[in-house]
Image (tube, rainbow, N blue to C red):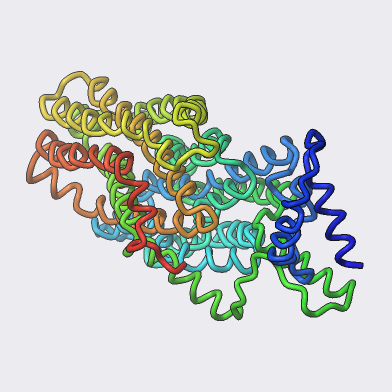
Amino acid sequence: MSAKHSSSDGEATRSSTDITPDVENVPIKEEKKQDEPLPDPNIVDWDSPTDPANPQNWSHRKKWANIGTLAAITFFSPLASSLFAPGVPQAQNEFNNHDENLATFVVSIFLFGYVAGPLLLVPLADIFGRVPVYHVGNIGFLIFNVACALSTSMEMLVAFRFLAGFVSCAPMTVGGGTIVDILPPAQRGFGIMIWSLPVVAGPVIGPVAGGFLAAAAGWRWLFWLLTISGGVATIAGMIVLRESHPAVLLDRKTKRLRKETGNTNLRSKLDQGLTTKDFFVRAVTRSSKLLFLSPICGLACLYNGFVYSILYLFFTTFTFLFSEVYGFSEGIIGLTFVGAGIGMLAGMLTYGFTSDKIIAHLTRKHGLEKAKPEFRLPLAIFAAPFIPAGLFLYGWSAQYRLHWVVPLIGTALDGFGFTILLSSIANYMMDTFTIHASSAMAAITVSRSIFGATFPLFALQMYASLGWGWGNSLLGFIALAGCAIPPLFWFYGEGLRTNPKFQLKL
């Protein structure tokens, strides 16, 4: 009976235009058919290529509702990283603590939370799903901001700021995995734009809003604002966000089918055969492996971290530059961040509306069916020189006390370069590491947080020793050397990705 069915299947697979008997080839087809392994009936997969349960097949509306809500949630953590900066002097006066190092540390400690958070949150998202991690992180963010608002000492502020940063980095760390889950590579450019805009806009908007709010209502209201607005976003997330992690969804489907059928041998197609403990340990170490053992991820993280740290260096020094050199008031100083903000907006729009088109063009040009990750890099190559150019203009115009608009133009150039470069690197990492995109983004978050938290600690000493011109030129020369990294990936990235020497067991 099985032979009969096999013969019937062989006949059905022949082309309808092939009307010439081909008796000699029939045994060969039969033998080939028999050699092919039969699908394991105990493996649980999607029902079909168009299975609506597969996040890649979600409706257009559902995909973008999830991405938009994720972007809204992502906004509040980077906003919190800098919103408190203008309120630090008020808090110091209230607590009678005027330690300058502690004043800087209470701002940067939030980013140290970003260093520890991803190493724990990514494994938890791989085990329990991305959405539960988002929800727990959002609720924790609200709790610790309330604690900050009620703090009675600078030491309490430092502790609760660290915990707020620790739990709130989930959308920035795990969010990249959600984008990969639901969007094909050809559409990820615009998705990355929507998701990553808050990552760069939040730190810029923070000092602007924080300066005026602290002056009008006091430093504690900075945290109440984060709690109220973050609470609205948290509720929206609970209503809109849906789980998208393929391994988690298939695992849930497997458990449901086991219960319905009584077949305990069923297992998910994506099941790695590990215990929860072993899976967690492997997931915890995966980001570290990528960071230290993958030349692509390691170099990208190093460059990304340096570029991101310049943004936080601006936060530390704008107040001193524009108050001491240009005589701006406390409220007006916050508006100086608008220059970088305008540049970032221009960069984000440029990236969002050109990235996917460039990918499609290069894929057609090279006659490929699937785009290479390196096709994400032309915009990075284009944007990288804007960063040293902006640093040189910002530094020397401040050194010679040119009109205040000139250094702001320099920060706008930096903002334009930052946004395109960071988005390009994030997309390149996602396309390169695909199912481990969250681990790659965790490595990026860790590295840039270390840079972003430590650079402001020595910024004022550097400018005091070298001046605004040579201090920013030092950074500009490093950024100029970094311009070689995107072309390096363009020419040698594929070789590094496919070299057996660098294939990691993840």
Coordinates of residue 322 in the picture (x, y in percent)? 24, 31
- Horizontal and vertical percent position of residue 266: 77, 74
Of all residues shown, which one is farthest toward the left? 465
Residue in the image at 80% along x and 80% along y: 264
Camera-side residue of 128 and 4: 4
Q: Count how many numbered circles sit on residues in the image.
A: 0
Does any portion of residue 391 appear in the rendered image?
yes
Q: Nearer the viewer, residue 31 or 345?
A: 31
Locate residue 73 relative to residue 477 in the image: left or right.
right
**Residue 422 falls in image quadrant:** top left
Q: Can the viewer see residue 329 in this picture?
A: no
Along the line of sight, the residue nearer the viewer: 241 or 36: 36
Q: Residue furthest right?
A: 1
Left or right, residue 186 beside residue 103: right
User: Is 55 left or right of 87, judged from the image as shown?
Assistant: right
**248 or 336: which is nearer to us?**
248
Quarter occupied by residue 60: top right
Going 39% across and 33% down the picture, which residue do you hit?
A: 420
Image quarter (top left, top right, bottom left or bottom right) of the N terminus: bottom right
Q: Quadrant of residue 215?
A: top left
The residue under the point 53% across, 39% down is 370
Residue 461 horizontal/vertical position (percent): 14, 50
Q: Locate residue 395, reporting x and y percent.
A: 17, 32
With respect to residue 413, does 309 lie above or below?
below
Residue at 46% of width from left, 47% of height from top?
A: 78
